[in-house]
Structure formats: structure tokens, C-alpha cells
């Protein structure tokens, strides 16, 4: 199936590894011109080479930095048609162990960076009357995961942003959706010491997801065929969360 992605300009944030990297590869394989953004120049350069695209080194922990990364991508690609909003997960805490500085840091890194990136990408999308915005959140936004106070709270809030923004821009043929990973085997899970086989037994599909499983859904949401899907939060989790 031709997904209508060939020639579209895509910016994938948080793309030096994991889900962002897999999405960048998937979009490039559909013929998109891809810019990838993350902090680590070496790893990023490798991904940029792999997708035959542009590597943009930015620390996306503020609104200003995220907006600058999008402007850079617009300059280098001539525009951004597909924006994948993604960054690293905040540290694990409980309510009582979360300091004010942690709340503010996570708010800037997870929330305001999304706002900055979307704010910078929207004018061009509106002008062209076409756009795809996909915000990577987490199933923690639907049902809290223990010890992930910052992620549980802020990602649920991002779903409110996706919902409200999708209505504001729908008439300009811009779709805005959230995509929720469940357990996808990335370096992050390894670093968090997740017991993969124990986790798999609690998943109806009886396996941990792959970054490629996740990227395939992001690619569909980026496609021409997904033009009537907006304001949705979709789980890619092997059946852990149910919406019906
Ligand atoms: P990851 O940690 O493997 O990759 C995150 C990417 O974002 C990397 O490229 C990293 O360099 C980049 N990044 C992190 N902080 C950054 C910053 N300040 N500026 C620029 N780039 C930055 O994570 P992942 O597994 O690919 O997950 C992506 C997102 O999805 C994360 O927010 C994660 O918390 C969330 N998530 C993942 C899972 C999962 O199963 N993998 C589950 C739920 C939620």
C-alpha cells in the first residue's frame, strides 16, 4: 500500500535510539525526508546516516530549545509535514520523593518542549493545510504505574493538549494524536532493569513489544490514509489497556 509518505518532510525528536530511531527508520523506508534530533552527536549521526537524513543536536529540555530544533529542521528540509514529539522519560519517583525542582524540570522537558515544538511546526502546516503531529506518551497516562509519579501526571496532561489542539487545527487538515507505548524493548527498559520475561507474562500478547511494532503504528498515523484519525490516544501494548 502506498502510504503517501514519500517526499513528505518528517522531524523525529528523541531519535538517537529506541522508539524515535525506529520511527525515523520506518518513515525513511516509506520515502520521507527525515530529520532526527537528540542530544548525543555521535549516536545521532549514525541514525542520520542510516535514514539518509539530517541530524540536529539539541537538548530538548526547554520550550525554547524544542522550538529551535523545529525551526532548524524547517530550514534544512524546507518544512515539516510530520512531527514526532518525543523525548526521554522523567526519573522514577513517588509523590513524596518528588521535589519542586523535579516537577519543574519534568514539566519543561516533557510538556513545554512539546509545546515549543508544536508551536514552531504549526504555522507551516496550517499554511499548507496538511500536517501530522504525533505525541509519544505512555500507557502510564491511562493507568498510573507505581513509582512513575512524573510520567503518570504529565503524560495524562499531554493527552488533554492533544485532544484540545486536535479540534483547533482539524479544519486545516492537520491531525494530532498521542501514541502510548506499553512495554517496548528499548535500551530504556534495559537501563530500568525491567524483568522482560516476567513483564511478558502479564501482557495478553505474551511478549514484550518491539520498537518496530510501535513505529509501524506511528507510520500509519503519519500516512495519507490516516487523514480522518485525530484527537486519539492509541495504545501499542499487546492488549494491556482496553478502550472498550
Ligand atoms: P529511550 O530512553 O531509549 O530514548 C529516548 C530518546 O530521547 C533518545 O534518543 C535520547 O537521546 C533522547 N532524549 C532524551 N532526553 C533528551 C533531551 N533532553 N534532549 C534531546 N533528546 C533527548 O526511550 P524509548 O524507550 O525510546 O521511549 C521513548 C519515550 O517513550 C520516552 O519518553 C519513554 O519514557 C516513553 N515510554 C517508553 C516505553 C517503552 O517501553 N520503551 C514505555 C512507556 C513510555
Image: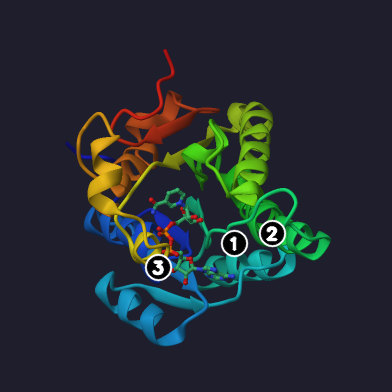
Tell me which numbered mark, 2 or 1, is placed earlier along the sequence.
1
Residue 177 place in picture, x, y as percent:
51, 36
* Label 2 packing within 10 angstroms: few (<14), some (14-19), many (20+): many
Tell me which numbered mark, 1 or 3, is placed earlier along the sequence.
1
Determine if the C-beta at disc 3 is less than 8 A from ligand 1.
Answer: yes
Residue 57 place in picture, x, y as percent:
52, 80
Residue at 36% over, 68% down: 17
Q: Is residue 55 visible?
A: yes
Residue at 41% over, 75% down: 54
Q: Residue 91 got which mark?
A: 1
Residue at the outermost left position: 1
Q: Which residue is mark 3?
A: 191
Question: Is 204 left or right of 87, judged from the image as shown?
Answer: left
Q: Nearer the viewer, residue 66 or 142?
A: 142
Q: Is residue 33 visible?
A: no
Residue at 72% over, 62% down: 63
Q: Residue 106 got which mark?
A: 2
- Which image quarter is the C terminus in? top left
Dot 2 and dot 1 residues touching (CB under 8 Å) = yes
Amino acid at each position: 500500500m502506498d502510504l503517501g509518505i514519500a517526499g513528505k518532510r518528517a522531524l523525529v525528536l528523541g531519535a538517537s535510539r529506541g522508539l524515535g530511531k525506529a520511527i525515523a527508520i520506518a518513515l525513511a523506508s516509506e520515502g520521507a525526508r527525515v530529520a532526527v534530533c537528540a542530544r548525543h552527536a555521535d549516536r545521532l549521526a549514525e541514525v542520520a546516516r542510516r535514514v539518509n537524513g539530517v541530524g540536529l543536536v539539541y537538548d530538548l529540555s526547554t520550550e525554547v530549545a524544542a522550538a529551535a530544533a523545529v525551526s532548524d529542521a524547517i530550514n534544512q528540509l524546507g518544512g515539516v509535514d510530520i512531527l514526532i514529539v518525543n523525548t526521554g522519560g522523567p526519573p522514577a519517583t513517588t509523590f513524596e520523593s518528588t521535589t519542586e525542582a523535579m516537577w519543574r524540570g519534568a514539566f519543561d522537558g516533557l510538556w513545554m518542549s512539546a509545546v515549543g515544538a508544536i508551536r514552531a511546526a504549526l504555522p507551516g502546516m496550517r499554511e499548507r493545510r496538511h500536517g501530522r503531529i504525533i505525541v509519544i506518551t505512555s500507557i502510564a497516562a491511562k493507568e498510573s504505574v507505581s513509582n512513575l509519579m512524573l510520567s503518570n501526571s504529565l503524560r495524562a496532561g499531554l493527552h488533554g493538549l492533544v485532544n484540545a489542539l486536535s479540534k483547533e487545527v482539524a479544519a486545516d487538515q492537520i491531525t494530532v494524536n498521542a501514541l502510548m507505548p506499553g512495554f517496548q524493548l528499548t535500551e530504556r527498559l534495559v537501563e530500568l532493569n525491567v524483568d522482560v520475561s516476567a513483564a511478558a507474562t502479564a501482557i495478553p500478547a505474551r511478549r514484550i513489544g518491539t520498537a518496530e511494532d510501535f513505529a509501524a503504528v506511528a507510520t500509519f498515523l503519519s500516512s495519507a490514509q490516516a487523514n480522518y484519525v485525530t484527537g486519539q490516544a492509541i495504545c501499542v501494548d499487546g492488549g494491556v489497556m482496553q478502550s472498550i
